[in-house]
């Protein structure tokens, strides 16, 4: 049982009930749900105060040039990047394909976006020679996903554009609108701001799969547009300020309810407002520079007051999916396809026997319609496999599972998210290796991770070593095992620990576990973990904070390579606490731990559950496991990073 005895399981279940009733509430901390245009133009203090984690950057140069530019910003400001590019019939589709390829090695790139979508789409429809704008857009979206299905596609749309005929079926078919991942929904006219909730509902109806980003102009807008749509009179200073703050409060409510995912500020320059383009008469009348700057500073300060400490505190949600759910289980493996909001679950144990069924939870983050369970009717199936590890390759759209109670076999499932008519099929990989290069027979001390960029799986046994499997998704060549020669001394022998993988820096990160009856809370990194780029070496990672998670085993961990953040959850004998470590790989500085769900009312403590990360909504989805009983419920914590 993965190195955990039955008696320890029983004792842990009893202790969970006690822990669940002894937790106390405390004030929720400020979460990280803010993005901005041009993060580099803000003062570092403003970005720090609100925890800015996304920056939208405009770039019309070649993809190589734009990626170099945004890569420097992502590294220096520790943000994910939404890249706004022009929409045209000559370069956009080709550029989109290049961005898809480049994003595989640059996980900071989260989304390709079209700014002022309706205006750009209108210009495309009037292009000479004539083009079919819907066909051009369809090619752009397909190319964005061509090499990296996790790369999102989005667009900026304004409230007054939602009724535009260019967004209706004749000009933009419903099938095309269903492929938008994000809508950045901004308010053009200040007096429309108090109706923001209505516009969110309209945007959702038009773009049913899209996450909504609430756009906010925390800048003097009096000279740009009339105060009211269809009007001719500009807002007064007081109206501009009051309508802005009222709209922002509504957007916060929408964020807290889950109707929108983030709040995005434009134009930036927060803390350095005087440096913005006030010389443009569309931004400010020449005689009112001082007034425009003062009004903008007042809005920025008001935004800090409205948002700081109040932005969508991390919240647990127990899903109530339609459909017939899987039977209760623990020790199962799970993967997440964030592009389609689908979690796939395989195997596990129901106390008495191992399982080898495969299940889908559609709408897994609980934010886009009612989640739904259904069992996949697969061709073939691995043996019953509790404690196997599941990994997802978004490029080939394949689920990979390794080992479990059945040993060290590797299986691959095609179409694991059921997004096409092709019937999902399980196939066992036949890997080549000499005897000395084969992983040890399962001892209960293994964990494994996957490098989706180089198609390499890594298996770590804390008592025996590390092995890598090339062509781990079954494509590109014959899978082959190799045992790594590793420099330095690694973590002590342990079971029930967690591993995650940072593909950007080629590091495997190990946390916690149990050995000799003692739980650990140490963090280790294995450099060159896939066996490429140099000699692998173990490095113990110190913590960059005074507090860190308590020692634990039987917990789960998820990782976001774009932000280099690892989140762990619960464990045997632990409360249902969630901790996130930024700088988790330890490349630039020691990991910085934060208790994410401090005071949030959540599930009972549990262990041997599965947990996956939806990178689109920064949600951790937890399924099954053991608390006071064996479970088949799914709970979601948003946001975790």
Image (cartoon, rainbow, N blue to C red):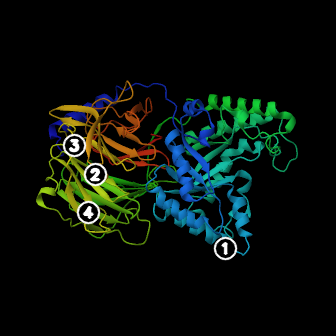
Q: Earlier in the sequence, mark 3 or mark 1?
A: 1
CA gap between label 3 and label 1 equals 58 Å
**Pointers 2 and 3 in contact (C-beta within 8 Å):** no
Q: Residue furthest bottom?
A: 129
Of the numbered discs in the image, which one, if any, rests on residue 174? none
**Residue at coordinates 85% horizontally, 38% vertically from top-left?**
286
CA gap between label 2 and label 1 equals 47 Å
Residue assigned mark 1: 132
CA gap between label 4 and label 1 equals 43 Å
Q: Secondary structure at mark 4?
A: strand
Viewer can see residue 288: yes
Q: Of tags 4 and 1, which is closer to the observer? A: 1
**Pointers 3 and 1 in contact (C-beta within 8 Å):** no
Q: Earlier in the sequence, mark 4 or mark 2?
A: 2
Number of residues whose C-alpha sits closer than 10 Å to that of mark 1, classed few (under 14), some (14–19) or many (20 or more): few
Residue assigned mark 4: 411
Q: Of tags 4 and 2, which is closer to the observer? A: 4
Q: Earlier in the sequence, mark 2 or mark 1?
A: 1
**Residue at coordinates 21% horizontally, 39% vertically from top-left?**
488
**Pointers 4 and 2 in contact (C-beta within 8 Å):** no
Q: Earlier in the sequence, mark 4 or mark 1?
A: 1
> Compared with residue 436, is residue 421 higher up or lower down, i.e. above or below?
below
Q: Secondary structure at mark 3?
A: loop
CA gap between label 4 and label 2 equals 15 Å
**Residue at coordinates 69% horizontally, 39% vertically from top-left?**
247
In this view, the residue in front, 374 or 570, is: 570
Q: Quadrant of residue 558?
A: top left
Of the numbered discs in the image, which one, if any, rests on residue 487? 3
Viewer can see residue 326: no
In this view, the residue in front, 534 or 504, is: 534
């Amino acid at each position: 049982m993965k190195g955990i005895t039955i008696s320890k399981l029983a004792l842990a279940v009893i202790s969970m009930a006690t822990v669940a009733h002894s937790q106390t509430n405390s004030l929720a901390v400020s979460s990280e749900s803010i993005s901005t245009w041009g993060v580099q133009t803000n003062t570092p203090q403003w970005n720090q105060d609100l925890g800015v984690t996304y920056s939208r950057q405009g770039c019309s140069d070649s993809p190589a040039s734009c990626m170099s530019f945004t890569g420097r910003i992502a590294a220096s400001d520790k943000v994910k990047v939404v890249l706004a590019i022009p929409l045209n019939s000559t370069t956009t589709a080709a550029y989109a394909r290049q961005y898809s390829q480049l994003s595989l090695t640059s996980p900071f790139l989260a989304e390709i976006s079209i700014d002022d979508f309706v205006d750009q789409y209108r210009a495309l429809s009037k292009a000479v020679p004539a083009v079919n704008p819907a066909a051009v857009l369809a090619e752009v979206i397909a190319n964005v996903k061509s090499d990296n299905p996790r790369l999102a596609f989005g667009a900026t749309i304004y409230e007054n554009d939602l009724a535009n005929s260019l967004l209706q079926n004749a000009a933009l078919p419903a099938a095309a609108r269903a492929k938008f991942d994000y809508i950045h929904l901004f308010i053009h006219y200040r007096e429309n701001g108090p109706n923001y909730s209505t516009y969110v509902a309209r945007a959702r109806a038009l773009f049913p799969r899209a996450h909504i980003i609430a756009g906010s102009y925390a800048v003097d807008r009096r000279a740009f547009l009339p105060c009211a749509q269809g009007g001719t009179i500009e807002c007064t200073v007081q109206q501009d300020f009051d309508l802005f703050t009222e709209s922002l409060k509504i957007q916060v409510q929408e964020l807290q309810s889950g109707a929108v995912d983030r709040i995005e500020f434009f134009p930036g320059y927060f803390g350095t407002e005087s440096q913005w383009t006030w010389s443009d008469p569309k931004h400010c009348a020449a005689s009112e520079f001082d007034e425009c700057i003062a009004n903008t500073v007042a809005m920025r300060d008001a935004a800090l007051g409205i948002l700081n400490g109040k932005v969508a505190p991390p919240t647990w949600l127990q899903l109530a999916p339609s459909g017939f759910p899987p039977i209760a289980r623990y020790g199962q493996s799970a993967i997440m396809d964030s592009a389609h909001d689908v979690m796939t679950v395989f195997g596990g144990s129901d106390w008495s026997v191992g399982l080898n069924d495969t299940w889908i939870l559609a709408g897994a983050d609980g934010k886009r319609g009612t989640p739904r369970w259904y069992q996949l009717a697969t061709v073939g199936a691995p043996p019953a496999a509790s404690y196997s590890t599941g990994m997802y390759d978004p490029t080939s759209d394949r689920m990979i599972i390794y080992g479990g109670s059945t040993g060290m076999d590797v299986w691959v499932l095609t179409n694991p998210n059921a997004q096409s008519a092709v019937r999902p099929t399980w196939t066992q990989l036949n890997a080549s290796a000499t005897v000395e290069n084969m992983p040890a027979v399962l001892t209960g001390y293994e964990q494994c991770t996957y490098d989706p960029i180089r198609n390499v799986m890594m298996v770590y046994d804390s008592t025996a070593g590390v092995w890598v499997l090339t062509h781990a998704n079954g494509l590109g060549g014959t899978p082959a095992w190799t045992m790594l020669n590793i420099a330095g001394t690694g973590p002590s022998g342990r079971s029930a620990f967690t591993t995650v993988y940072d593909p950007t820096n080629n590091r495997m990160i190990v946390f916690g576990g149990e050995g000799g009856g003692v739980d650990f809370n140490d963090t280790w990194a294995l450099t060159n973990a896939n066996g490429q780029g140099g000699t692998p070496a173990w490095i113990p990672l110190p913590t960059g904070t005074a507090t860190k998670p308590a020692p634990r085993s039987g917990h789960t961990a998820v990782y976001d390579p774009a932000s280099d953040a690892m989140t762990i959850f619960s464990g045997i004998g632990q409360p249902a606490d969630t901790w996130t470590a930024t700088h988790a790989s330890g490349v630039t500085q020691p990991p910085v731990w934060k208790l994410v769900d401090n005071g949030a009312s959540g599930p009972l403590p549990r262990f041997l559950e599965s947990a996956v990360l939806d990178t689109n909504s920064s949600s951790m989805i937890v399924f099954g496991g053991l608390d006071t009983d064996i479970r088949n419920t799914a709970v979601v914590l948003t946001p975790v990073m």
